[in-house]
Every structure is written in structure tokens, then in C-alpha cells.
């Protein structure tokens, strides 16, 4: 669901997970997941959002800044 950019972001996330099944690169995975969320946000009408991928998780992960 979503526009082309949402589908592309989702595909990029799934390809990363498929190609790196045992990867511990949490930052890379979070950025890809954040990109999916941002593209969903944009497709819902927030085209000019100033948020980045990691902003999509700051409300959820309390120590995000410490691990960047």
C-alpha cells in the first residue's frame, strides 16, 4: 500500500534483511525502517516534512541519541 516511494522503501528494507540475515547492523536497519515510515508519512500528505529517518523512532527508543 502507498505510493511508489513507499513500495520502493519497503522493497529496500526487505532486500537488506534478506541479504543480511545475521547482520547486527541495527543502525542500517533502523534507517531503512525509518525511511519506510517517512515515505508513508509523505504519501499521506506530508510532502514537505522536515523529519529524517531517525526522527521516526525518537519517540519510541529512549536512548537513541546515545547509540548513534
Image: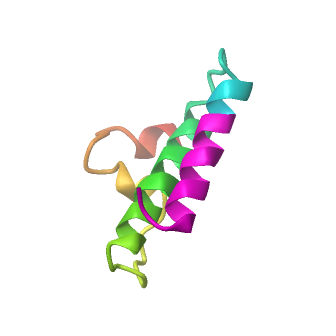
Return the x and y of residue 36 as percentages of the image width and height: 48, 53
What is the x, y in percent for residue 13? Answer: 59, 42
**What x and y, as percent, mark residue 41?**
36, 67
Left or right of residue 15, residue 62 in this image: left
Farthest residue, direction bottom:
48
Indicate whether 1 appears above or below 16.
below
Residue 59 in the figure: left or right of residue 10: left
For residue 18, above or below residue 14: above
Question: How has the structure been colored for display?
Answer: rainbow
Main SS class of the magenta portion in the image: helix
Q: Quadrant of the N terminus?
A: bottom left
Residue 39, magenta (yes or no): no
Residue 38: where, in percent of width, then height?
Answer: 43, 62
Residue at point 50%, 41% (across, down) = 30
Number of labels in the image equals 0
63 and 56: which is toward the camera: 56
Considering every residue shown, the one lying at the far top of the view is 22
Residue at the image position 56 percent from the left and 37 percent from the top: 29
Find the magenta span and give its range: 1-15
18 to 32, vertically: above or below: above
Does residue 62 appear to the left or right of 30 in the view shown?
A: left
Residue farthest to the right, as pictured: 19
Q: Residue furthest left?
A: 59
Amino acid at each position: 500500500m502507498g505510493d511508489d516511494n513507499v513500495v520502493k522503501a519497503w522493497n529496500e528494507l526487505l532486500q537488506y534483511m534478506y541479504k543480511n540475515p545475521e547482520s547486527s547492523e541495527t543502525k542500517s536497519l533502523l534507517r531503512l525502517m525509518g525511511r519506510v515510515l517517512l515515505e508513508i508519512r509523505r504519501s499521506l500528505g506530508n510532502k514537505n516534512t522536515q523529519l529524517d529517518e531517525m526522527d521516526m523512532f525518537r519517540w519510541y527508543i529512549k536512548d537513541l541519541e546515545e547509540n548513534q
